[in-house]
């Protein structure tokens, strides 16, 4: 039996070793026999094993070559499944093209790049019927936040625009090796067939970048140079409001008021 390589802190690796949570996450991924499912960062195969046992065709994207023998050994143990390994960085891999058909996306995402992977996947949401990610609890809080929440920010606005969001459950630090300093959570994202609102993405992202970049400031201050106080008032939004009080719809109204391309 091939030994599991030591986790590399530089790659944000934390192995999920608790069998209860491994099975619980596998269940919510809904693997189907003979059907593709894309896994990001399988590592030693903590989640891969359950997916293969269900008979799924697991397309695994892994940048650490040390795990190849471990994963190949695991695949041989479950002949009812199929494993296709893609060595490479998930941030640079066209995940939406891997299966050749819509396929669920799952991953115990590295802490250092998890947010960017989520955003990239949502940009190609048509390729993924549903996504299941294991991330820091704080990041999942930001993904699922709504207006008025302390965690409401740029990430929540974007996720609300593009997907149905649901935090499923927490995973304690003790379920991992090495043990992280934070609690993790599992989040479900179901991409919408079309964005919730018809809004210019670039303008929306610029509005939210400025507003939440200075979240303690009123809109008339944080959006200065992009929208005047009169422009903000014309949308029906109070220029003295702070960004955490605004809904997705309000941010879309502000984006529509931006005149420059």
Image (cartoon, rainbow, N blue to C red):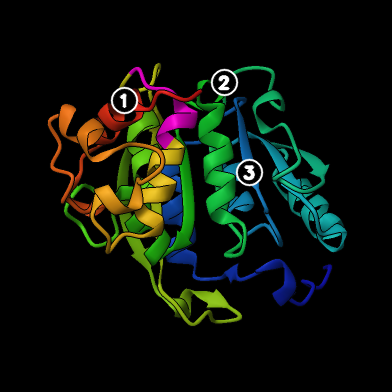
- Magenta stretch containing residue 30, yes or no? no
Q: Position of residue 89 (x, y in %)?
A: 77, 48
Image quarter for residue 140? bottom left
Q: Which residue is mark 1?
A: 257
Q: Position of residue 146 (x, y in %)?
A: 22, 47
Label 1 or label 2, whichever lies nearer to me, is: 1
Q: Which residue is mark 3?
A: 39
Image quarter for residue 54? top right
Q: Is residue 201 visible?
A: yes
Q: Quadrant of the N terminus?
A: bottom right
Q: Is residue 32 visible?
A: no
Identify the residue shown where x is 53% and y is 79%: 180
Identify the residue shown where x is 35% and y is 45%: 223
Work out whether residue 40 or residue 247 is closer to the camera in this orientation and state it.
247
| Mark 3 / mark 1, whichever is N-terminal | 3
The disc placed on residue 102 is 2
Secondary structure beneath disc 2? loop
Q: Position of residue 29 (x, y in %)?
A: 46, 41
The residue stretch that appears in magenta: 198-204
Identify the residue shown where x is 48% and y is 56%: 134
Label 3 or label 1, whichever lies nearer to me, is: 1
């Amino acid at each position: 039996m091939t030994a599991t390589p030591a986790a590399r802190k530089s790659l944000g690796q934390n192995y999920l070793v608790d069998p209860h949570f491994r099975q619980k996450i596998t269940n919510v991924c809904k693997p189907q026999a003979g059907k593709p499912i894309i896994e990001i960062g399988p590592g030693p195969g903590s989640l891969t094993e359950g997916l293969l046992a269900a008979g799924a065709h697991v397309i695994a994207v892994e940048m650490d070559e040390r795990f190849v023998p471990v994963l190949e050994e695991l695949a041989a143990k479950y002949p009812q499944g199929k494993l296709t390994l893609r060595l490479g960085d998930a941030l640079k891999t066209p995940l939406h093209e891997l299966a050749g058909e819509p396929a669920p996306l799952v991953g115990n995402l590295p802490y250092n790049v998890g947010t960017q992977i989520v955003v990239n996947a949502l940009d190609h949401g048509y390729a993924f019927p549903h996504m299941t990610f294991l991330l820091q609890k704080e990041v999942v809080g930001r993904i699922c936040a709504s207006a008025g929440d302390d965690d409401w920010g740029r990430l929540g606005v974007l996720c609300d625009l593009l997907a149905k969001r649901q935090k499923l459950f927490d995973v304690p630090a003790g379920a991992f090796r090495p043990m992280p300093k934070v609690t993790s959570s599992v989040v479900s994202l179901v991409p919408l067939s079309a964005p919730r609102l018809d809004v210019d993405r670039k303008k929306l992202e610029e509005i939210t970048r400025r507003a939440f970049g200075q979240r303690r400031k009123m809109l008339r201050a944080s959006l200065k140079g992009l929208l005047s106080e009169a422009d903000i008032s014309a949308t029906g939004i109070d220029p003295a409001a702070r960004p955490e009080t605004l809904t997705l719809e309000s941010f879309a109204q502000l984006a529509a008021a931006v005149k420059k391309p």
